[in-house]
Amino acid sequence: MTGAGIELVETSGVFALDGGTWEVSNNIWLIGDDREVLIVDASHEAGPIVEAVGDRDVIAIVCTHAHNDHITVAPELAAHYGAPIRLHPADRPLWDSSHPGEKYAPLTDGERIVVAGVEVRVIHTAGHSPGSVCLHAPQLDSLFSGDTLFSGGPGATGRSLSDFPTIIDSIRSRLLPLPPDTVVRPGHGACTTIGAEAPHLGEWIARGY
């Protein structure tokens, strides 16, 4: 890789919440170059992530939110690389249900993380969970949206600690003003763009999910 770029690692496993379990596939995004990398989410198993990172320095493991399928191996990766786990503190109850006693460094809205010369801005987008965040890397024309925004609409809000009006407000006020050609790279499934999703906001509100 020459210059900063984006790599995708896919893993599969179980998402568990509110007494239910679902088999899911997750996207883990690596932002960086040949020397250093930022890991976005730590899903299911460490092996594929470690293989993709190789011998590069890990700046941080940033968790877009604390549902168990996005943080499964965060402590394992942090120990392996000597890198901090970053998470918005509003998701502390979810984090503690998976990793009680494990430490993380709090993310703040508007914070900027620099990796391989690229600035990544933290955008707090509550709704799917209280501490959900997206990461905007304008130099890479990319938004790492976690479970806040997908191709086809918002992330799910039918479970505990989630709220549909809140996620709609987050998307409308914080994400849709981004440039239309911004590539949305979600925590599950296919990529989309801000421009492709913006015209459908009214439809999502009308259907209620």
Image (cartoon, rainbow, N blue to C red):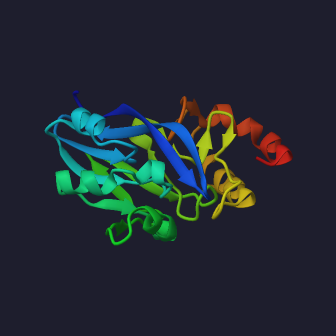
Q: Is residue 100 visible?
A: yes
- Nearer to us in this view, 141 or 54: 54
Residue 108 placement (x, y as % from top left): 44, 67
Indicate whether 192 appears above or below 90. above
Q: Is residue 111 found left or right of 48 in the rendered image? A: right
* Quarter holding residue 105: bottom left
- Nearer to us in this view, 144 or 139: 144
Q: Is residue 4 visible?
A: no
* Quarter holding residue 104: bottom left
- Nearer to us in this view, 55 or 37: 55
For the point 68% across and 34% down, the residue is 152
Indicate whether 175 appears above or below 24. below
Residue 101 placement (x, y as % from top left): 34, 72
Residue situated furthest left in the rendering = 55
For the point 18% across and 35% down, the residue is 54
For the point 67% across and 55% down, the residue is 167
Q: Is residue 107 found left or right of 55 in the rendered image? A: right
* Quarter holding residue 48: top left
